[in-house]
Amino acid sequence: MVEQEFLKKLTTKTDSKIVLLVMDGLGGLQNETGKTELETANHPNMDELAKKSICGLSDPISPGITPGSGPAHMSIFGYDPLKHEIGRGLLDTLGIDFEFTHDDMAARGNYCTLDEKGIITDRRAGRISTDKNIELCKKLDGMVIDGVKIFARPVKEHRFSIIFRGKGLVDKILDSDPQKEGLKPLDAVATEKSAGFTAEVVNKFIQKAKEILKNDHPANMVLLRGFSKMVKLPKFQEVYQLTPACIALYPMYKGLARLCGMEVINSGDTIETEFQTLKDNFSKYDFFYMHIKQTDSSGEDGDFQRKVKIIEQVDKSLPVLTSLNPDVIIITGDHSTPAVHAGHSWHPVPLLIYSKKCRFDKVQRFSESDCICGGLGRISAKEIMPIALSNAGKLLKYGA
């Protein structure tokens, strides 16, 4: 696979434009009808685009590996997710415009539901409203534990950020979130001796939070994961010679975009307003990353039909994108979230790359079963950016 340092030597600035549309958790599995969500949905605009594209499947990390959203997006953006490991806490916190300092360490929090035996019955506390989240964060905000100040900031629905501010904090800590219901929350365990003090502070916070929230059913406990201090990434502008923009509704994806050097454009709260934001700003940038969250959340909830409807909703707005006539259009997901699995899975992700210069294949419909026969074959998600850049005329020839 081509590394960014090598690509950096070949990229060149042009007027061509690339739009990357990521439908989070797009990949699915067949239900009792024998079809996936994408195969069930009516999406004539995606299908029409597929006929003029080259299609395939991509592996976010490696075959058989189930990815989180952070590393899966890193791959699509052309970064090595094994080399650039970033905790979810940092991404969420950057996405809510928190002013991060070098003394800060962030964790991604979920409010969850515990039963009387301390067992997790709902990792997302019924997806409580963001307003309720704001109320609960006020109860947790402002603690000082062993000289470490703690900030609690709402993100969206049941998700929040916890920021620990103090000297000498080390982020080598295992999650307290077991990622499964029917289990008890875990202790935050240091994976290196240097993180011992930090782990003690985190565990004291968790116990205090449990006491504070004990009567706030269904959000009567917190789960923490993705501990991270600030990291530095090569910027899109430096590696790809692009002027990139991000259009996303959820803070985590805004945070990752900012870390990669993208400018985040404020959008409304719907899929339709995201596409309108693309149209309104199309002349200002040459790379757009558009993120659709609802495909993933419906898959995580095990709601097959809602995921189908979200795909159809995106398809209805697709003509807004295609009418802008970008040089390259990429449609894919960061990973698979089959509703029958009710969570992320290891299955490869459908991928479509359209350009006026692509050698299109015989795929007639954008779906898992069609893409498996596409001209791209099965590739690593890290290869998407080089292919997109070439189709946009942004890569020079290598060698004489």
Image (tube, helix red, strand yellow):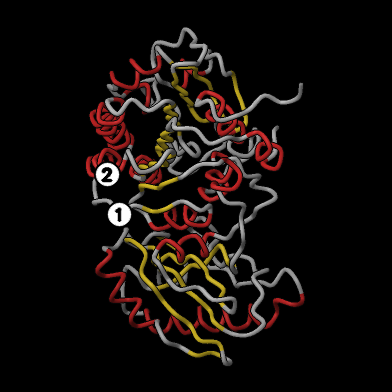
Residue 181's disc is none
| Pointer 2 residue | 277
Which amino acid is tagged 1? Answer: Asn
Q: Is residue 159 above or below residue 396?
A: below
Q: Answer whether residue 248 is visible to the viewer in this image.
A: yes
Residue at 67 percent of width and 74 percent of height:
170
In depth, the one of 39 and 292 nearer the eye is 292
State which tag comes first along the sequence, 1 or 2: 1
Q: Answer whether residue 340 is visible to the viewer in this image.
A: no
Residue at 52 percent of width and 23 percent of height:
391
Q: Quadrant of the C terminus?
A: top right
Q: Within the image, what quadrant is residue 52 found in?
A: top left
In depth, the one of 11 and 160 nearer the eye is 11
Which amino acid is tagged 2? Answer: Thr
Residue 266's disc is 1
Percent position (x, y) of residue 293? 36, 45
**Secondary structure under badge 1?**
loop
Q: Within the image, what quadrant is residue 39 found in?
A: top left
Q: Quadrant of the N terminus?
A: top right
Q: Is residue 41 above or below residue 227?
A: above
Percent position (x, y) of residue 367? 42, 21
Residue at 44 percent of width and 26 percent of height:
328
Residue that lies at the very extreme toward the top in this rendered image: 362
Q: Is residue 291 above or below residue 90?
A: above
Q: Is residue 145 above or below residue 56?
A: below
**Secondary structure under badge 2?**
helix
The alpha-carbon separation of the residues under discs 1 and 2 comes to 8 Å
Q: Residues within 10 Å of mark 2 (few under 14, many from 20)?
A: some
For the residues labelled 1 and 2, say whether their Cβ atoms are less than 8 Å apart: yes
Percent position (x, y) of residue 297? 36, 46
Q: Residues within 10 Å of mark 1 (few under 14, many from 20)?
A: some
